[in-house]
Amino acid sequence: MRRINTIVDAKEEIAKLKNLDCAEDDVFFQAMEEVLLSIFPLFKSDEIYNKSAKNAIVRRLITPDRVIKFKVTWLNDKNEVEVNTGYRVQFNNALGPYKGGLRFHPSVNEGILKFLGFEQILKNALTGLPLGGAKGGSDFDPKGKSDFEVMKFCYAFMTELHKHIGPRIDVPAGDIGVGAREIGYLFGAYKKITSSFEGVLTGKPFFFGGSLMRPEATGYGVIYFTQKMLELEGRESLNGKVCTVSGAGNVALHAIEKLQQLGAVAVTCTDSKGTIYDARGVDLALLKELKLERRASLEEYIESHPEAQYIPTSEYPEGGHAVWNIPCYAAFPCATQNELTVVDANNLVQNGCKSVSEGANMPSTTEAVHVLQQGGLCFAPAKAANAGGVAVSGFEMSQNAAMQKWTFEEVDAKLKTTMEDICENVSATAKEFGVAGNYVDGANIAGFKRVADAMIAEGI
């Protein structure tokens, strides 16, 4: 029974695993490879975690418990039948009920959801809460749809999904394309179909069981994590420092909000069409109006602030992004996966950036992460840094179970403590396994070990 003792051994195992049916998607394989290469010190420390050992933890962990795929038919406003595909990847429930968001976006497919669900297992484990990992969604695009069309789709989607979820089985939440409006419709559909008022979804409106601070949670959480990481690594705080942020959704805007509250100067925001660079610090109120209320292009920002710069995506050289070529102390990729390339990483290093924290799910390519680490930057991986969203979702589940409501301040304090605890755990784990300062390895080892221990304890 061969043990994985070196990176060479780990790469050999990855090459074998790549041929498995569950690893056909490139993004999922990228996530799996990153984890397996990170945790080989754990394999070396104890054979019970070894891929080749009798427990077969790696093989079991990278294979979802089940992948549910279904047809969603609904009527648009012209009374025409529309057909979409729905999914729920229930990946692992060793630590608790399946937990993970629903994404409504044309790019959704089984491979992307496997990647997101796999990451969710370890992310949820790091919170210390009793949560398993899952992800779901549909190729339905809410953009350009009327509220009535979105409602009809959500009811049709839940007609099938309700068979597979429950407050102690699987508790979905929101993700890209699924905000408070969609969660409200989904909850209404679940209640109508089952006649049950249960905490089966998180991210609900406050008046029927939602938690305060859920929209802010991921953005605030990534800043709390970064604060603690900089402190543990003996770096200067964010106060007074120039920071760059990508994205224009809840995560990005609330990361900017928390940065401003801490005295940092957030100078950027991006969407698919371009980048806003405002050297004085971005106008958060205007950004929220443009992106959360009107869903308009960031190009309109310069109509109110002509002194700011708008850089169209099409004008920046291929392979890089304007937002990561702006000198900063700390960078926060909060848009989408693989948005920060090796070109961007080299620009950040050359421009003197000291910290990169991932607000989106795996927004940095593998090569970019290596460049950032070799450049001596503090690097906070998504599964640790952006765990604030699922942490507050866990708090919502607790409030629902106890029929309680917590204040904004209570939730914020619990979130800050949770993110600091995650950071300290990741840092301590990295030191324990001989990779001090490597938050990628520390997060992967800590999360994997917690799930693996539960899997071993429950048997097969």
Image (spheres, rainbow, N blue to C red):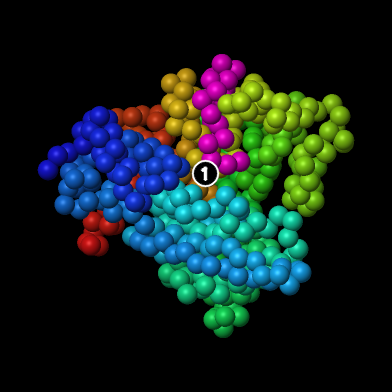
* Circle 1 residue: 361
Decide whether residue 442 is among the magenta residues.
no
Q: In the displayed orientation, state which residue is furthest to the front.
A: 80
Q: Position of residue 304 (x, y in %)?
A: 87, 36
For the point 22% across and 51% down, which residue is it? Answer: 56
Q: 242 or 413, which lies in front?
A: 242
Question: In the picture shown, does residue 25 fall above or below 342?
Answer: below
Relative side of 28 to 148, left or right: left
Say few, some or many: other residues with alpha carbon within 10 Å of mark 1 (under 14 / 14 to 19 / 20 or more).
many
Relative side of 61 to 378, left or right: left
For the point 25% across and 39% down, which residue is it? Answer: 13
Q: Which residues are magenta?
A: 335-357
Q: Position of residue 457 (x, y in %)?
A: 23, 59
Relative side of 185 to 45, left or right: right
Picture quadrant of residue 265: top right
Q: Is residue 70 visible?
A: yes
Q: Is residue 376 visible?
A: no
Q: 281 or 264, which lies in front?
A: 281
Q: 149 or 176, which lies in front?
A: 149
Q: Position of residue 293 (x, y in %)?
A: 78, 52
Q: Position of residue 99 (x, y in %)?
A: 46, 60
For the point 65% across and 56% down, which residue is it? Answer: 141
